[in-house]
Image (cartoon, rainbow, N blue to C red):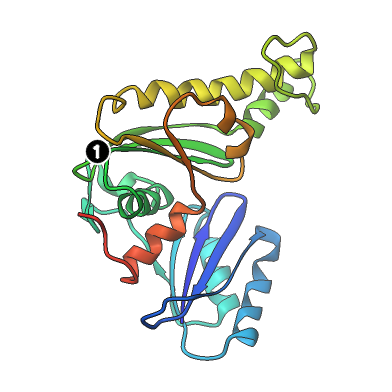
Amino acid sequence: MILLVDAGNTRIKWRLLADDAVQAVLDEGALGHDGIDTIGRLRERHRGPLRVVGSNVAGTAVAKRITAALGVDAVEWLRPAPQACGVRNLYDHPEQLGADRWAALIGARHTHAQASLVVTAGTATTVDLLSADGDFLGGLILPGVDLMQQSLARGTAQLPLADGRYVPQPRRTVDAIRSGCLHAQAGAIERMFRQIAAEPGALCLLGGGAADSFAALLDIPLRRIDNLVLCGLAVVAGLHSANA
């Protein structure tokens, strides 16, 4: 069996695959950092040798807790590289790219053979350009929807942290905050997509827990897909081959 682990800033997502020709999904789920210890219950439900391949942006302490909870000798944590699985990393310093972004780009390359804008909307929103040739051209990191709202509440005396809703012409403060944060996400994504819009088959691949909050606002070719990080880790683990 092969366990794929996406250790994010607030949640741990995982997928257990059969290590055979079928590569069936045996189990999958997500949990908060406070529930990491419970991931070890997988070993009770699924007996047998276990290989673990993961992406971690949550720090070394979380990585150690995951390894200990699973009772394995080591986890194969993905490290960004200049090139892997059909993707070329054009970051000025390739090793400084987040492992989750690297895995998502590899997943995107396997999922869509043409140019793509790879967007993951979570605690932060990442917006990355991937050429049809598999070159990672660069990308954005911006606060996620909830983080934007929280920053307004912390940094101002008059703007509350309250539930608002999206409306085209907000006439309540809470709606103005919510609508503004959603427009900021959609606007950044659409501006980045312009750089590949003329490419044949160009597509935005959108995933992450906050994606549904602004997906309907996007006026670009779009495909909702979860979880590109786990898809990329499957490619890295050798369960799929990249499109390159």
The image quarter in which residue 213 lies = top right
| Residue at the farthest bottom position | 48
- Can residue 111 be seen here? yes
Q: Pinpoint residue 60: horizontal percent, then vertical percent.
A: 50, 60
Task: Judge the density around disc 1: few (<14), some (14-19), many (≥20) Cα neighbours within 10 Å.
Answer: some
Relative to 224, residue 150 above or below: above
Vertical order, 157 against 143 (above or below)? above
Q: Is residue 112 above or below residue 235?
A: above
90 displayed left or right of 168: left
Image-based side of 114 in relation to 38, left or right: left
Find residue 37 and report its horizontal and vertical position in percent: 66, 72
Amino acid type of disc 1?
A: Ser
Residue labelled with disc 1: 131
Residue drawn at the location 44% of the way across and 52% of the way down: 228
Please state which of residues 24 and 73 is positioned toward the viewer in this rendering.
24
Q: Nearer the viewer, residue 113 or 238?
A: 113
Q: Quadrant of residue 52?
A: bottom left
Residue ID at (66%, 33%): 146
Visible in this render: residue 155?
Answer: no
| Quadrant where the image shows the C terminus | bottom left
Local SS, label 1: loop
Left or right, 212 with respect to 83, comes to right
Q: Say how many tags the image has.
A: 1
- The residue located at (55%, 45%) in the rendering is 208
Q: Position of residue 16 (x, y in %)?
A: 52, 73
Q: Is residue 63 left or right of residue 203?
A: right
- Residue closer to the observer: 219 or 194: 219
Residue in view at x 66 percent, y 80 percent: 41
* Residue 241 percent location from the top left of the image: 27, 64
Give the vertical position of 238 relative to 166 (above or below). below
